[in-house]
Structures are given as structure tokens and as C-alpha cells.
Amino acid sequence: MISVAQALAQLFTLVTPPGVEQVPLTAAMGRVLARPVTAHADQPPFAAAAMDGYALADTPRPGATLHLIGTAAAGAAFDGAVGPGQAVRIMTGAPIPQGAMTVVIQEDVARNGDQITILPRLGPGSNIRAAGNDFRAGAVLTAPRRLGPADIALAAAMGHATVPVSRRPEVAVIATGDELVVPGQPMRADQIAASNSYGLHALLQSLGALPRLLPIARDTPAALAQAFALAAQADLVLTIGGASVGDHDLVAPAASAAGFDLAFHKVAMRPGKPLMAGRSARQLLLGLPGNPVSAMVCGQVFLAPLIRAMQGLPPGPAPRKVAVLAAALPGNGPREHYLRARQDAAGVTPFDRQDSALLSVLAAADCLIVQPADDPPRLPGDPVEIVLL
């Protein structure tokens, strides 16, 4: 067995650079920017009014009276210059007229027809946004990054209608096992609903991948060969179950027969020891254990970092943070342990039941406590690392 860190390192070596495609800004939310985007022009491209008010060429003085000569609005600049003793009514975002040096906000002015008088309560500041105040031509929106609303707004302000993003990885999800039945279908007494594939499908969607659920593969070499054939166009083949060494655990030989070279098989962690990964000429393989919690925990620990790397984001483990134990934690054995837990004001508390088949406990958890191999017992108040769910 290898450690979780070693398994992740080997997994990342199997990733090849993603393809790149141009998408419109309206389709860019959540996509990973593949190449830097450069601003075509300064923003704003001209000095602009930061407030509604009056543009003056003079230094404003309380009591001064000026003659109003025109109006400037956003998208409708004043065509002329402002001289001494003159003022232009100006709206927020409008270009500053030639000759103007300051904008007095409308609350600091009394108007009488074409005359304005500066009031005694005059506030400080010019109320002018300089040209290029936000960014200059040539400014860069760096990549790679997962694009959020603010990034998309910035790309638009930089003058881009489309952005280059990493192609979303297509993932074929193969649940294996004679005992599995599609949820909602009739079951025999010795069968269970196939839950893992649906949870992992949801996880893949949240990560920006394009998952595709394939028919459940039965525990025969022929059924698994057919499943791998159906998955032939995917970037990643994700198998669930059959990754151990029992009489019906046939995924590893089926993967080898389909052209995959296995990089590792078994990881020193719990839940989730029977885990494997490999690569063929054009596809990645990740084989998860069949126990529901094992599959979902391995999804957080391995699948999520893999999908991020397949989209061009820097490879790295699932983000961790430090929390304080609110309850005692027994010592750990030789495998890194991911305990289902919940946070509150007192700290983080592991659930009493940690069986790898208990989806109800996983659904109630909001984090995983990461307990290192051979870790000694921990007391309330001790710091621990957690992975947020």
C-alpha cells in the first residue's frame, strides 16, 4: 500500500494538459480560464464623474456663484470646454469636460436657473475618476483560475466577448456489482440501490466535469468489457466497486484488458483502501471502492483534486483547515483516517459511528477529520486538520 500523498502524486502524473475552447462570457461561469486575458483599453477610458453634480474649472469656494453652460451625461459628453466662472451639470459616469478640474456634488450646490452657488457645507475631494483608474490597457486577468461573476465582469470590461477556457472533462461513471439496482426499480431481498454513482455524478457536476452514468456492470468479465467499451470516448473512466481482491472483484483485470496500465492499487487510508488508478493511450482510470461512504470520501480526497487538475488548475490535495476538537479522539492505526464529523461553536466532533456503509452519517457531516497514521489519542481542545464537505 502507498500513502494518500503518494497516491495523489502518482495520480497527478497521469494527467495531460486539457484542450482549450473559446466560450461566450454568458457560458463562462464556473469554467477554468486557460490562458491570460489582456485588457484592450484603459478602464475607464476617460476621466469620469464619480458623483452627480457640477464640473468646474475653478477651485470651488463656498459662496462662489458660477454660470451653468451645459450638461454632461453618461454616454452624452459635453461638447465644449469649461472656463473660469462656468459650470457644467454632470452625471455619474459622464466624461469630465475639457478644462474642468473638479466636480462639486449636487448636495453642495444651490441652483437658481442658469446660476449655481457653492454652499458653505462644501465637502472635500475632486469626485473625479481618473482615466485608467480601474486598470490600464495591457492589464492581465491571470490564468488558470475558476471564473466567478467578478472575473466575468472584469473580462467584459477588458473588451472580451469570449474567453479561452479548459475543456470540461468527460467522465464515464461505471457502478459495478450484481447486488446493485437502479434507484426506484424493483429489488430482490439480496439487492440494494446503486447510490454511489448518483452521489459521485453530483460531485462531478459541481466540479465542472461532464459526467455520464453508464448501465450498471455485472460481476462478469464480459459485462465489464462492455462497460469499458461504452466508456471509450470519455476522458476519465470512473469505476465504483470491484477494486479489491475478492472472487468477484474483476475491475483491475478488466481495466488491464481494456488497455489501462495501473499506476497503483490500494492506498493506506480508511475508509477507502481498495483504490486504483491508471492510464491508457488516451484515457485516465480511477477505481473507487464500493462501500458508499468509502466511495464518497475517496471522491473528495482523490476525484475532486483530479478533476481540478484535468481542467488545468494547479495539482494539489483537497484544501484543509485547522479546527479544535470538541470531543476526545482515540488513537489511530497504520492507515490515515478520514472521520465524518460536524462543527459547532465548541469545535469539531467526530460521529460515534464511522462505518463505511453509513450514508446517513456522511449526509449529517459537514467535514472530515484527517487523522494521520499512528496518531496518538487526542483530547478536547487539540488542533486537528479537517476537509470541508
Image (spheres, helix red, strand yellow):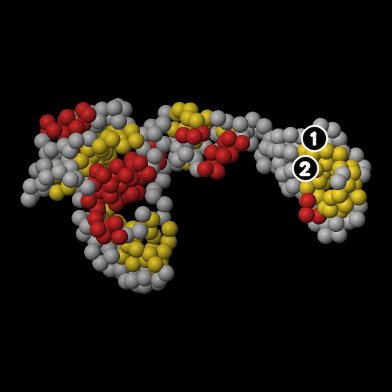
Q: Quarter-wise, where is residue 375 in the image?
A: bottom left
Query: What's the distance in space between the residues labelled 1 and 2, CA to CA?
Result: 9 Å
User: Which residue is denoted by mark 2 in the rendering?
Assistant: 90
How many numbered dots are placed on residues in this image?
2
The picture places residue 282, in percent across and down from the top left corner, at 31, 27
Q: Residue at x 39, y 34 (%)?
A: 168
Residue 66 falls left or right of residue 91: right
Q: Residues within 10 Å of mark 1 (few under 14, many from 20)?
A: many
Name the amino acid, label 2: Ile
Residue 144 falls left or right of residue 211: right
CB contact under 8 Å: marks 1 and 2: yes
Residue 282 falls left or right of residue 153: left
The picture places residue 2, in percent across and down from the top left corner, at 28, 48
Query: Residue 296 or 74: which is nearer the viewer?
Result: 74
The answer to whether any part of residue 256 appears in the image is: no
Describe the element under mark 1 as helix, strand or loop: loop
Residue 108 falls left or right of residue 357: right
The picture places residue 231, in percent across and down from the top left corner, at 25, 30
The picture places residue 32, in percent across and down from the top left corner, at 46, 37
User: Which residue is denoted by mark 1 in the rendering?
Assistant: 78
Q: Residue at x 74, y 39 (%)?
A: 73
Quadrant where the C terminus sits is bottom left
Q: Residue at x 24, y 61 (%)?
A: 354
Describe the element under mark 2 as helix, strand or loop: strand
Name the amino acid, label 1: Phe
Q: Residue furthest left?
A: 189
Q: Residue furthest front?
A: 113
Query: Residue 214 or 183: which is nearer the viewer?
Result: 183
Q: Residue at x 89, y 56 (%)?
A: 62
The answer to whether any part of residue 106 appears in the image is: yes
232 is higher (above) or lower (below) than 121: above
